[in-house]
């Protein structure tokens, strides 16, 4: 399951991480229908509070979830917080949330001030998992291609 929780904002433009927790729990991610990859959630998002999401999913499923987080961007802006859509300065980062044991994260710098977080699932033949947030927009197509090339190298 890949899930960009869009700054923790729900359908009513309110900051609501519980919506993401409920969605993850409802979907019960299983990327291939087989046990070896069950429970891998890759997410790129902003102001996400990864531990809160992991704790919420753990409480809802009764399963222990590992979480790793790599901060990609930070700004001292607090406009989300002052509008009730956040709890502090704005950040953006990458999360891997899984029921499985994973290797230590390996963060790589990508073109256009982006990052990639590469890990592997230890008990699934070291299945590689990558998390990133590629640059968006038509004008950034060439940059996205460079970012993908870097991730695959």
Image (cartoon, grey):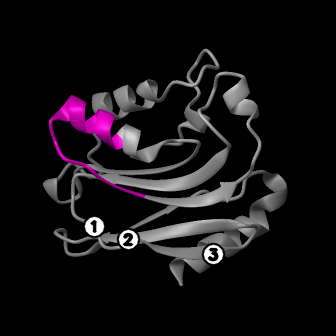
For residue 33, above or below residue 22: below
Residue at image position (38%, 29%) is 23
Marks 2/1 in contact by CB < 8 Å: the verdict is yes
Marks 3/1 in contact by CB < 8 Å: the verdict is no
Say whether residue 74 is magenta: no
**Mark number for residue 102?**
1
Q: Please give the residue where the numbered disc 3 appears in the rendered image.
A: 109
Marks 3/2 in contact by CB < 8 Å: the verdict is no
For residue 42, above or below residue 8: below
Sequence-first tag of 3 and 1: 1
**Mark number for residue 18?**
none
Q: Position of residue 99 (x, y in %)?
A: 22, 52
Sequence-first tag of 3 and 2: 3
Q: Position of residue 135 (x, y in %)?
A: 71, 58
Left or right position of 119 against 7: left
Residue at image position (38%, 45%) is 51
Which is more toward the observer, 89 or 34?
89
Sequence-first tag of 2 and 1: 1
Say whether residue 65 is magenta: yes
Which span is picked out in magenta? 54-68
Q: Please give the residue where the numbered disc 2 appears in the rendered image.
A: 119
Which is more toward the observer, 89 or 133?
89
Please rate how many residues cluster around mark 1, counting C-alpha atoms within 10 Å: few if below 14, some from 14 to 19, many from 20.
Answer: many
Mark 1 residue element: loop
Q: Position of residue 89 (x, y in %)?
A: 67, 42
Residue 100, quarter of the rendered image: bottom left
Q: Position of residue 43 (x, y in %)?
A: 47, 49
Cα–Cα gap, marks 3 and 2: 15 Å
Cα–Cα gap, marks 3 and 1: 21 Å
Which is more toward the observer, 55 or 111?
55
For residue 88, above or below residue 112: above
């Amino acid at each position: 399951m890949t899930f960009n929780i869009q700054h923790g904002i729900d359908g009513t433009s309110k900051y609501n991480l519980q919506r993401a927790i409920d969605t993850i729990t409802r979907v019960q991610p299983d990327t291939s229908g087989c046990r070896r990859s069950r429970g891998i959630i890759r997410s790129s998002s902003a102001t996400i509070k990864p531990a809160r999401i992991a704790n919420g999913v753990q409480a809802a499923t009764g399963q222990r979830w590992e979480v790793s987080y790599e901060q990609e961007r930070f700004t001292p802006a607090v406009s989300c917080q002052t509008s009730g859509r956040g709890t502090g300065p704005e950040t953006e980062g990458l999360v891997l949330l899984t029921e499985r044991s994973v290797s230590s994260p390996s963060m790589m710098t990508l073109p256009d001030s982006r990052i990639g977080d590469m890990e592997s699932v230890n008990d699934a033949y070291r299945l590689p998992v990558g998390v990133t947030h590629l640059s968006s927009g038509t004008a950034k197509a060439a940059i996205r291609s460079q970012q993908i090339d870097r991730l695959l190298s």
